[in-house]
Image: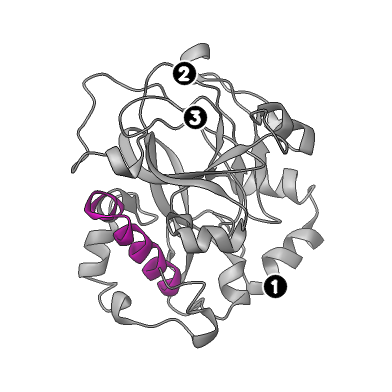
């Protein structure tokens, strides 16, 4: 989650039973719900490139939104009370499907578990400077896209949830029981929002973060996943079990919103899963 750029954070308050379950009591397969789930709009951003946005429960507002999360106080308002300060639930859908990866970012996380998030799909559709910084972006073939989620009615993605000291969307357990606390998920932004909000309309700030890598557009449909990062995410999903693995392959898309990762790995992306990451990144991107 932290590696994805130009997204934003959106807390959602608890709503009626929707869907999330612990790994231990999850079903062998994910079954569709008989009724439609409320629409949720979530956002989360990477270090210098994300916006935090607070939204009320879709169930409570008929799908309405809320204010942006831009300060420590905003996060404190949605954190659950308890000893040692409030805890915030984080939703992992890409690299944070890996507990090892999650702990490299949040060493003191608690309660790492599998969950389901309805009404969203995963999409490789934004440029990520971190891949250029780490030497794993391939500019010639446009393989430098990272992953975020975006609203998509009828979709369901298997995710992970864990607690830290900040938060944003209410996931449900895989048994359909909603968690009592809001959670944070990394959802898509837009170029204009990012430039005006995160860069404060400054071309200099934008160039420091993106322009120096010849990235003129962040959100786009003509780029492909960073190979090392995609392999890491697929392995992380596989380590969670068959339901999570199949869900990642079939409910994660390229920027065209049509090609699934399963299809991509069987065609243009063939060979990615056999490639090893650079020695210095084997632990970070090892699945």
Q: Which residue is mark 2?
A: 15
Q: Quadrant of residue 154?
A: top left
Q: In the rendered view, does 100 fall on the left or right side of 26?
A: right
Question: Is the magenta region chiefly helix, strand or loop?
Answer: helix
The span from disc 1 to disc 3 (Cα, nearest Å) is 37 Å
* Tag 3 and tag 2, C-beta contact below 8 Å: yes
- 7 in magenta: no
- Asked if one can make out residue 100 in the rendered structure from this viewpoint, the answer is yes
The span from disc 2 to disc 1 (Cα, nearest Å) is 43 Å
Residue at image position (51%, 24%) is: 180
Mark 1 or mark 3, which is nearer to you? Answer: 3
| Whole-percent x, y for residue 146 in the image | 49, 61
- 243 in magenta: yes
Q: Nearer the viewer, residue 166 or 87?
A: 87
* Tag 1 and tag 3, C-beta contact below 8 Å: no
Q: Is 282 located above or below residue 188 in the figure?
A: below
| Whole-percent x, y for residue 256 in the image | 35, 53
- Mark before the other along the chain sequence, 3 or 2: 2
Mark 2 or mark 1, which is nearer to you? Answer: 2
| Whole-percent x, y for residue 178 in the image | 42, 25
Disc 3 packing (10 Å; few <14; some 14–19; many ≥20): many
Number of numbered tags placed on the structure image: 3
Q: Secondary structure at mark 3?
A: loop
Q: Nearer the viewer, residue 83 or 185?
A: 83
Q: In the rendered view, does 179 fall on the left or right side of 190?
A: left
Task: Give the residue furthest to the front.
Answer: 83
Tell me which segment is drawn in magenta.
Answer: 226-248
- Mark before the other along the chain sequence, 2 or 1: 2
* Tag 2 and tag 1, C-beta contact below 8 Å: no
Q: Quadrant of residue 85?
A: top right
Q: Which residue is mark 1?
A: 212
Q: Which residue is mark 3?
A: 170
């Amino acid at each position: 989650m932290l590696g994805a750029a130009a997204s934003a954070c959106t807390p959602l308050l608890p709503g009626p039973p929707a869907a999330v379950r612990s790994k231990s009591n999850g079903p062998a397969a994910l079954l569709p719900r008989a009724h439609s789930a409320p629409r949720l709009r979530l956002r989360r951003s990477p270090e210098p490139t994300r916006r935090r946005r607070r939204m009320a429960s879709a169930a409570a507002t008929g799908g309405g939104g809320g204010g942006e999360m831009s300060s420590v106080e905003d996060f404190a308002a949605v954190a659950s009370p308890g000893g040692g300060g409030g805890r915030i639930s984080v939703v992992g859908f890409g690299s944070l499907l890996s507990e090892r990866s999650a702990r490299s970012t949040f060493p003191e996380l608690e309660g790492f578990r599998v969950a389901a998030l309805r009404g969203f799909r995963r999409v490789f559709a934004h440029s990520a400077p971190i891949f250029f910084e780490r030497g794993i972006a391939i500019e010639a073939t446009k393989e430098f896209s990272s992953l975020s989620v975006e609203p998509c009615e009828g979709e369901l993605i298997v995710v992970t949830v864990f607690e830290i000291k900040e938060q944003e969307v209410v996931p449900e357990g895989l048994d359909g029981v909603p968690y009592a606390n809001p959670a944070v998920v990394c959802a898509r932004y837009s170029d204009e929002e990012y430039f005006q909000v995160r860069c404060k309309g400054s071309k200099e700030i934008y160039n420091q973060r993106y322009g120096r890598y010849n990235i003129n557009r962040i959100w786009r449909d003509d780029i492909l996943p960073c190979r090392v990062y995609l392999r890491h995410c697929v392995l992380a999903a596989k380590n969670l079990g068959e339901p999570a693995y199949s869900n990642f392959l079939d409910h994660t898309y390229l920027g065209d919103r049509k090609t699934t990762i399963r299809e991509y790995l069987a065609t243009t992306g063939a060979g990615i899963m056999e490639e090893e990451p650079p020695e210095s990144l084997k632990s970070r991107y090892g699945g």
